[in-house]
Image (tube, grey):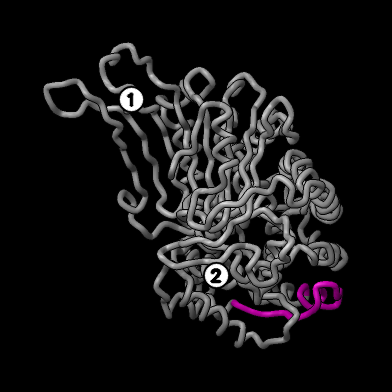
Amino acid sequence: MAEEIRHPFLHGLSKHRGAPPTVVVIFGASGDLTARKLIPAIYNLAHDGLLPADFHLIGFGRKAIPDAEFQKIAAEAIKEFSRREPSPEVWARLAARTLYVSGGYDEKPAYDRLGARITGLEKETGQQLQALFYVSTPPTVFAPIIQNLGASGLAARYLRQARQSKVIIEKPFGRDLASAQALNRELTTVFAEEQVFRIDHYLGKETVQDLLVQRFGNAIFEPVWNRNFIDHVQITVAEQVGVEARAGYYEQSGCLRDMIQNHTMQLLALTAMEPPVSMDAESVRDEKVKVLKAIHPLRLNADARPRDYARAQYTAGVIGGRPVKGYLEEQDVSPASATETFAALRLSINNWRWQGVPFYLRSGKHLARRVSEIAIRFKRAPGSLFADTDRSILAANTLAFQIQPDEGLSLVLNAKIPGLETRTQPVKMNFKYATTFGSNTPEAYERLVLDAMIGDGTLFIRGDETERSWQLCSPVLAHWAEQGRKGLDTYASGSWGPKSAEELLAANGHSWREP
């Protein structure tokens, strides 16, 4: 019985891959991400019996607050944002192991106090604790946090041992290639690459992980996953919301930095990568890097060949039956702003598998619906057998992975309409996660936090991977900065984007699919 009291989470862990005893330290403990995602994720892992036997949570922030107040803040976050109904028993066990340390991110004595607190927990439990540092702060304080983790010795705890320290870095990872390279240098001065987990929460979504299972676990797909059968690929990450209260951040970011360079490029890499030799982290990430290296630089100038991008800002419109204002009318947005709220790219992958297959990426705010999907458009079947039918309704087969909000998979096929005449009509076969497996699917952050504790980097981004992504996007950003508002298109809020995005596909005889 005493063993059960000391190790309240042990019963769940015994059935799992197994994380060592861990203390998770969240820098930016009072932030929105911590309340909405991180604390609920940790609670849900506790609820499902997936936390290590000896688990502790420490919040770190500038504001000096007692442990009890931080526990209250955490309880309120769980009540509001957790997918699980709060359990008094589970929360009581977790709350007893939830602590707080205050201090400035650039103050080394605060890190010494943090180290002393972790050492005290080790004495209480009688064993070594793995320290997982989650940097959930504005990028402006990434550097001092990393430097002080090194100066205090916290980064080197149990180095090259099973319980060595680890660090999770939230996006944005740099603003361009130069800043990403500088941040990587900062990180690798203090941490070994195997200790670093650059997070992109899209990689923790069930449908994104299912993409690999569908490709490499079903013999019907991989033989046709190439230029001989696929006409083009469309990746859409659409948001219905505008910038809301984030205009200060968004004016410095824009759509390309905020969504395309990270989330959307990761979806492309997983869609286009070669089969890895195994599903271990380095094998998967090696193949993703190879794909990114094979992408041809974008054509930026409108010369004899069409350029490979579209960019635009939303104007006033109607969303959900209510009028909304344009981007230039949003609070804290400059009337002369050239920040794009929509971006679309046409990419070419120069390798054997994808030569000649365009990849179209788009993302934007104030679009018609909130949806993220990957659509694989296959080449049309020869029409000679149905020459007497209406060719326009003999649709191209499309395999679509719906990533959010309704996670699932759909396949568009052609079928005969019942009747005495041979007439065809596109039909859709649907698989929905909620219908098949139930609606209480784990959140992306649950999987990613657990994987980081275990040391599985498969769903995280390696340093060379993020630099290669920036190598593709930085010239585009520099070109747009030089252009200013010249060439910046507009689109009505509630639409699917600007005319220039349609023209991007029309140049190849394609059109955007409505998700």
Quadrant for the N terminus, please: bottom left
Separation of disc 2 and disc 1 at Cα? 45 Å
Residue at the location (47% across, 37% down)? 375
As for residue 99 lying within the magenta part, the answer is yes
Q: Is residue 454 above or below residue 362?
A: below
Mark 1: amino acid: Leu
Residue under numbered circle 2: 36
Quadrant for the C terminus, please: top left
Residue 42 x %, y %: 54, 67
Residue under numbered circle 1: 394
Mark 2: amino acid: Arg
Residue at the location (64% across, 28% down)? 348
User: In this orientation, which residue lies closer to the viewer: 292 or 415?
Assistant: 415
As for residue 37 lying within the magenta part, the answer is no
User: In this orientation, which residue lies closer to the viewer: 327 or 12?
Assistant: 327
**Residue 244 visible in image:** yes
**Residue 460 visible in image:** no
Q: What stretch is highlighted in magenta?
A: 98-115
Query: Which labelled disc corresponds to residue 22?
Result: none
- Which quarter of the picture shows residue 73? bottom right
Q: In this view, does 423 lie above or below 240?
A: above
Residue 207 x %, y %: 46, 46
Q: Is residue 44 above or below residue 386?
A: below
Report the side of 476 relative to 202 (left or right).
Answer: right
Q: Which one is in front in this view, the residue at disc 2 or the one at disc 1?
A: 1
As helix, strand or loop, the secondary structure at mark 2 comes to helix
Number of other residues with Cα within 10 Å of mark 2, as a class: few under 14, some 14 to 19, many 20 or more? some
